[in-house]
Image (tube, grey):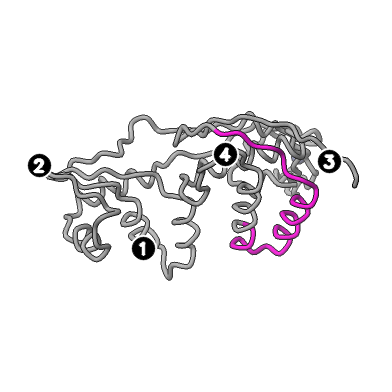
């Protein structure tokens, strides 16, 4: 039998759920699967693979990846990627600045450290919303599995509405707490449908301002000197 390779162990605190966990880097075999799924361009295959790799690499017991907020999963995955393949990612952009009526067209290389990508939380946005004098609704960040499942929604409106239904934590009427997990989904749908426009807008505001994993970079084109502002966002842009 060949000797086993010892893997290093890292710790991470997930930014939204505040869960602390230990993990090991992924192997070349797992990396190959991830790259293959990326090449297919099929988001669902990619997400399934990401979830599986995270499960394989998590040492801490009792962590359900699919139940974590989407941003926690993406943040965790970026860190795992950094520890497995390297912290620095290099992307290429074509300079679209016009010089003398012609596109510059220069290839600009942009490199950044994945571990420097912050989670931005909008502190002004509350998850507890007062609907009437005595009824409040408490929302939670959409879970990874919920967002994944809903990508099949027929329309954007369906997606938004279902996301709200699935992300209710509880409703409180001043006396009793009605937890969504213990409530018939049809009742939740009826409840949300009965809201007026103003109440619904308050709920939408929470979902329109979810935390994000992004970084703005300023990059100067070495050929024409134009300063580009590039936003790095979404895990696809961290793969190379
Ligand atoms: Zn240029």
Tag 2 residue = 175
- Label 1: which residue? 157
Q: CA distance from mark 2 to mark 4?
A: 38 Å
In the rendered view, does 69 fall on the left or right side of 186?
A: right
Q: Under tag 2, what secondary structure?
A: loop
The residue where tag 4 is placed is 75
Magenta segment includes 33 = yes
Tell me which residue sits at (73%, 33%) in the image. 87
Question: Could you give the CA–CA distance between mark 2 and mark 3, rounded to whole angstroms?
Answer: 59 Å
- Indicate which label's residue lies in the foreground, 2 or 4: 2
Viewer-proximal residue among 53 and 119: 53
Q: Which residues are magenta?
A: 21-46
Vertical position of residue 42 compared to residue 108: above or below: below
In terms of sequence position, does the residue under pointer 2 or pointer 3 come before the other?
A: 3
Answer with mark 1 or mark 2, whichever residue precedes in sequence: 1
182 in relation to 111, above or below? below
């Amino acid at each position: 039998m060949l000797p086993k390779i010892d893997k290093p162990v890292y710790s991470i605190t997930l930014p939204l759920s505040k869960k602390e966990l230990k993990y090991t880097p992924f192997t070349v075999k797992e990396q190959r699967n991830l790259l293959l799924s990326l090449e297919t361009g099929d988001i669902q295959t990619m997400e399934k693979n990401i979830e599986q790799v995270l499960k394989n690499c998590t040492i801490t017991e009792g962590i359900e990846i699919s139940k974590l907020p989407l941003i926690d999963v993406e943040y965790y995955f970026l860190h795992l990627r950094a520890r497995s393949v390297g912290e620095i990612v290099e992307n290429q952009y074509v300079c679209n600045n016009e010089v003398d009526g012609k596109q510059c067209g220069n290839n600009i290389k942009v490199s950044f450290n994945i571990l420097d990508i912050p989670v931005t939380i909008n502190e002004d946005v509350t998850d507890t919303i007062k609907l009437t004098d005595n009824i409040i609704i408490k929302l939670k960040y959409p879970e990874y599995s919920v967002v994944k499942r809903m990508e099949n929604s027929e329309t954007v409106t369906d997606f938004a509405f279902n996301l709200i239904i699935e992300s209710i934590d509880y409703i409180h009427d001043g006396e009793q707490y009605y937890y969504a997990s213990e409530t018939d989904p049809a009742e939740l749908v009826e409840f949300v449908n009965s809201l007026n426009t103003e109440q619904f807008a308050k709920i939408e505001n929470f979902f329109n301002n979810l935390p994000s994993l992004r970084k703005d970079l300023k990059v100067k084109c070495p050929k024409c000197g134009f300063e580009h502002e590039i936003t790095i966002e979404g895990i696809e842009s961290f793969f190379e």
